[in-house]
Amino acid sequence: MSGPDEDRLSPPLEHSRSIPLPRPFLPHLQVVMAEPLGRRLTDAGRFACAGLCGVSLCSLFPGEEQSSFRTGFIRGLVGWLQLSEAVLPVMEAFASGAGEEGSHSFADLLREEMALKDAAILIPQDLVSFSLRDGYYDSRARVLIRHVSGLLQVPFEELEVYEESLVKSLKGHEAEDSEQAESSQRKASRRRLKRYFLIGLAAVGGGTVIGLTGGLAAPLVAAGAAAVVGTAGAAAIGSAAGVAIMASVMGAAGAGLAGYKMNKRVGAIEEFEFLPLTEGTQLHITIAVTGWLCTGKYGSFETAWRSLRQCKEQYCLAWESVYLMELGNALVTLLNGLLNMVAQEALKYTVLSGLVTALTWPASLITAANIIDNPWGVCLNRSAEVGKHLAQVLLSRQQGRRPVSLIGFSFGARVIYFCLQELAKETGSKGIIEDVVLLGAPVEGGAKAWKALTKVVAGRIVNGYCRGDWLLNFVYRSSSVQLTVAGLQPIALEDKRVINVDLSSIVNGHLDYMKQMDTILKAVGVKTKDCRLEDQRNMSGLPACPHALHSTMPLRPETLPSALSPPSPSAAGPQTQPNHPPHPTPEFLQQIWWRIRVKSYSKIVSGAWSLSSGET
Amino acid sequence: MDEDVLTTLKILIIGESGVGKSSLLLRFTDDTFDPELAATIGVDFKVKTIAVDGNKAKLAIWDTAGQERFRTLTPSYYRGAQGVILVYDVTRRDTFVRLDNWLNELETYCTRNDIVKMLVGNKIDKENREVDRNEGLKFARKHSMLFIESSAKTRDGVQCAFEELVEKIIQTPGLWESESQNSKLRLSDSPDARGGGSCGGYCSML
């Protein structure tokens, strides 16, 4: 995303010789700073631009609770675009649901506008500048800009390049500080830049804390600092330091943030730390939350997220590794030692058919239940606590005032779920979270419970589920029958933001969420980098972890009785179908189930419950 | 308050630049008049509830800009309109002559055939009249429109223009009833219609 594209989009740069910044990055900035879009568009164009935002605001953020954001945004935008006050009433009407029919003519007109003939990207770019004007990048603003880019047929990737260029030019300016020969004009422009874009870009070594809030966010930083250094310390910082000092002080305090906070504030949590996944700073960040660990290959929090490239600045939450390790090992023991593949397949289809009740679980599984139930129970509680704590960290804006996307699987998804529930209870929590991806989440899947999440998430809420995840079903066996589990089925919530993705064809069991993460990420529309070739070879060859069953024994349809063969992943692909669950015929499965029970009864007693392919 | 409203009607105001479309609307909704009213940018929108024959109707009124440069923005608001007010200035013959163009545009972009049209000759308070009342009446008859002359400045005919239009719309049941029936359909259609479709995907594989 560099070179020719940007050159085409940006007009020739006159001052390029005098400014020693990397060339690709400055032009965009100059366009925006030198000539606001308001002056480049005709008044019909400006009206269309504001109107397009108004209509989009309403379709993206409906509901009474978002009305103040909608009006605030649209009012600011009318002023920013230098439109007459007279259009305010109609813009507010757009933002509250009237005139949906106009959005396409707005978009068409904008594309045709003379000034934009070749560069419709200027409009979303200008919206980014507008959104950043107070040093606060609201996640809702970013989602809106994403939406508007789509309507204007501007690839959002190009816009991300622009966002990056803003960050980089800011850094460039900072590095330039020592240089003497600066014209007064450039000084002024630099000041302006800082005011606009200095929103948490201070990078901290050691990987403890997410980028820090600086600049205009000082009051919030002080609030966060109180938690770190105690009230007295925070008061001292607040009084003595200016904005710049504050940023550096936070850097120092931030390094010790994790451990201190945990002991002090939430006694139950033993580990809570952010590990950087990718180097880089961006105007938005992604936090990935791992769901379990196990000895060997999957022993670190980062492993699952190797290929995650949702954005340049990504972190991974390290939490309660001891318990997650215990859980993961229990899962592996259960799956490797106690149940063979065929039995697991049968279980999978039994779960699919909905036949499972507390009585029909194989006896061997029931005897083995204590292996899994205990760590599972512990993690259920811990993940909820960690989630609530994560909410507090995000609320105190440790990450800076910029949008955060969250992604997690298994218990990581549970952490996120509780984080969002906690945020929904707090005030001032809107506009922090951008997108959320929950995979195989062991949480309640009722529409009512999930309704709360839509209040705090600006973009998409992806629920990736697997119908045949018998493990999830098993651990919830003692719960009331009515309880729906999000990781097993779609969320029946009528909201544009909620997207259910059926991963049944990719995920063969709960362990696969870790192992197939790359494929899953692609299926749910999260950006990934393709693993390097050597990596792929390693993965398909000898497994590093002897417990990693799935990678050594890929399940092939021909090794199973034909009746039981699962749909081939390549043929079926990920299915996004919220309302029509794929179900095998119940009678048929009942038949199979009984055969399994009868034939292998003796083996059940001995604890080696199995079913060989020849027996059916 | 919304409960006793019979229906919501979409009304459109069109006509040449400067004929007094926004002034008519302002007089109707706010009962004010501003001789120095600036040209409308793009489109304006106002809501007003009125009672006609004991029926309450909520009017969503779209006031379009007459100026040429906004001409690409306005047609999308024709869609789904139940009534249109076509305005000309009785002191400017050119605004009357160009009514044909407006009717053409209406025909092009409007989604229904039975839309109720009202022709309004505005600014009758002014001395230098160029278009006779009978001319307007004749034109309206020819194109089967309602007709009234008005003055936003003196209030003459303004209320009447909107009321008659709404009355006519309500008397044309197909025009607004289909709307409410549609919304009812959508309600009963909505979620939870699962169950029946539970057999998919995997069946074929077994």
Image (spheres, coloured by chain):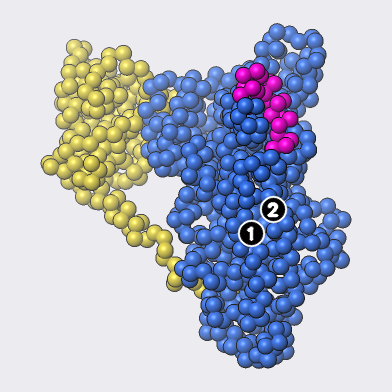
Chain colours: A blue, B yellow
Residue A583 figure quarter: bottom right
Residue A508 figure quarter: bottom right
Helix, strand or loop for disc 1: helix
Q: In this view, does A276 lie to the left or right of A125?
A: right
Residue drawn at x 18%, y 12% as measured from the top left: B127
Residue B110 visible to an observer of this rendering: yes
Q: Which amino acid does label 1 sit on?
A: Cys
Main secondary structure type of the part rendered in magenta = helix
Helix, strand or loop for disc 2: loop
Relative image position of residue A502 (x, y in whole percent): 59, 62
| Chain at numbered mark 1 | A
Does residue A337 show up magenta in the picture? no
Does residue A253 show up magenta in the picture? yes
Real-space Cα separation, disc 2 to disc 1, in angstroms: 9 Å
Q: Magenta residues, as a range?
A: A234-257
Check disc 2 and report the residue beneath it.
Answer: A320
Tell me if mark 2 has few (under 14), some (14-19) or many (20+) residues whose alpha carbon lies within 10 angstroms of its own: some
